[in-house]
Image (spheres, helix red, strand yellow):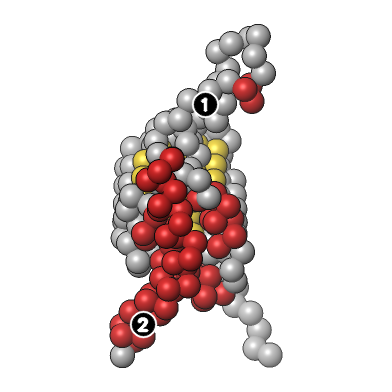
Amino acid sequence: MKSLLKQVAHVIATALVAPLMLPELLAQRVAGRDVWFHTQTELLSLVPGKIGLYVRGAYYHRMLRRCPLGCGFQFGTIINLEAEFGERVCSGANVRIGVATVGDDCIISGGAHILSGKFSHGVTDPTVPFNKQPPSVARVHLGRNCWVGANAVVMADIGENCIVGAGAVVTRPFPSDKIILGNPARAIADTFDPKLIEGRKVNAMASPKMPAA
């Protein structure tokens, strides 16, 4: 029953975004580029609650190169047309995702930014202001099962099973199975280090319990 209700919700959400989606798809065929996509994504990012999750999911499912219906994007999330997503990706509120490929089961916490590489503006010509130089866009890859913490900034590739700490700034690539913290970010441990996991268990057991009300 739950699966059936979700399917019905996806159909309704698709019908709701069709007046935005269909003209944009037609305009892209004629112009050879996106026309109203950015305006539409900003508008849809402001739809709250469950309705917002479903309408954003339906819109991105049909507009992006790859975005399965199981993905969920919270309020305020803005996504680049060139982004690609694996299965069951979810974002917190006010996330920005540029030209990126995000693997299955990734979590992107609130306020995080996945940039389109390190240079959003060119810096090669000293006679031209940065905002008038052509950008140098590079696709950023996040491996499957990564967790990007709140307000982190990622501008380089990350392997599978990585945890990026809150507020970290990732400026260089990291291999799989790393816990990445700091600005600039560095790997401080392996994700599945038995000693680290055991330490977490000990800390949890030693935490004082709140007194009963």
Which residue does the image show at 55% across and 30% down from the upper left? Answer: 120
* C-alpha gap between disc 1 and disc 2: 42 Å
Q: Quadrant of the C terminus?
A: bottom right
Residue at disc 1, secondary structure = loop
Q: Nearer the viewer, residue 100 or 134?
A: 134
Q: Nearer the viewer, residue 31 or 83?
A: 31
Is residue 73 at all visible to an observer of this figure?
Answer: no
> Which label belongs to residue 72?
none
Q: Where residue 90 sits in the image (x, y, percent)?
A: 44, 61
Q: Where residue 20 sits in the image (x, y, percent)?
A: 49, 61
Confirm or deny contact between disc 1 and disc 2 (CB under 8 A).
Answer: no
Q: Quadrant of the N terminus?
A: bottom left
In the displayed structure, 114 sits above or below 72; it is: above
Q: Where residue 204 sits in the image (x, y, percent)?
A: 49, 67
The residue that mark 1 highlights is: 135
Q: Where residue 193 sits in the image (x, y, percent)?
A: 34, 50
Q: Nearer the viewer, residue 131 or 31?
A: 31
Q: Nearer the viewer, residue 178 or 62?
A: 62
> Amino acid under label 2?
Val
Categorize mark 2 by other alpha carbons within 10 Å: few (<14), some (14-19), many (20+).
few
In the displayed structure, 209 sits above or below 147; it is: below
Q: Earlier in the sequence, mark 1 or mark 2?
A: 2
Is residue 144 at all visible to an observer of this figure?
Answer: yes
Residue at far front of view: 30
Which residue does the image show at 52% across and 26% down from the upper left? Answer: 135
> Amino acid under label 1?
Pro
Total label count?
2
Which residue does the image show at 36% across and 41% down from the upper left? Answer: 141
The residue that mark 2 highlights is: 8
In the displayed structure, 90 sits above or below 166; it is: below
